[in-house]
Amino acid sequence: MHVSPADGKAPHRVQFRINGRQISAELEARVTLLDFLRDRLHLTGTKKGCNEGACGTCTVLVDGKRMNSCLTLAVQCAGRDITTIEGVALSGDLHPVQEAFISHDAFQCGYCTPGQVVSAIACIAEGHATDANSVREWMSGNICRCSAYPQITAAVLDAAQKMGG
């Protein structure tokens, strides 16, 4: 898939793999990954919260590592593998973290949930989902304004156990 710039300026041609699809785009250097995902690819599961890297609603995986997409320039991700909330399901089935969030009612308004789920996947993969204190520490970059933290922590620990992490 090829995406052209919205305003006709195209100083950088970049390619990514986003949620398993090869994407080619012409982008201005100033375009954030968050804005590219939401505005150009219409992947609106990644939320724009503070737009300062403080809340975690924009968390995505870049080469398997968590990144705040509001602070990351899209051109910095050229040639990299990006996973958004839309890409975490496995072969059409919910990811174990998504299932755990549902079973533990780990969302209230739901605005932070996509970033929380993506961050939880990374937290487990990094080996930090060993106990409640560790989960709270390693998930602290994701803010839940509804205060579903106990349910989120339980969901992460449950998913980690089920995933063998």
Image (cartoon, rainbow, N blue to C red):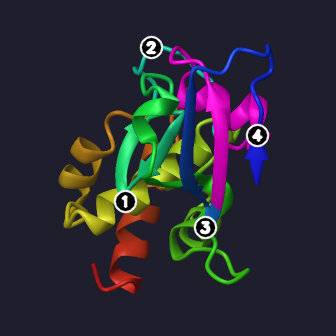
**Relative to residue 115, is residue 165 depicted above or below?**
below
**Residue bearing mark 4:** 3
Instruction: Say which of marks 2 and 3 sits in front.
Output: 3
**Mark pair 2, 3: CA separation:** 27 Å
Pair 4/3: label in front: 4
Tell me if mark 3 has few (under 14), some (14-19) or many (20+) residues whose alpha carbon lies within 10 angstroms of its own: few
Q: Quadrant of residue 163?
A: bottom left
Quadrant hosting residue 25: top right
In the image, residue 116 above or below residue 147: below
Amino acid tagged 1: Gly
Query: For numbered disc 2, what is the local secondary structure?
Result: loop
Q: Earlier in the sequence, mark 4 or mark 2?
A: 4
**Which quadrant, please, contains the C terminus?**
bottom left
Tell whether label 2 touches label 1 (CB within 8 Å).
no
Does 39 sit above or below residue 23?
A: above
State the extent of the magenta-drawn residues as a range.
Answer: 22-45
The three-letter code of the residue at mark 4 reads: Val
**Residue at image coords 20%, 67%:** 127
Q: Magenta span has 28? A: yes
Numbered disc 1: secondary structure: loop
Question: Dot 1 corresponds to which residue?
Answer: 64
- Asked if residue 102 lies in the magenta stretch, the reply is no
Amino acid residing under circle 2? Glu
Residue, disc 2? 52
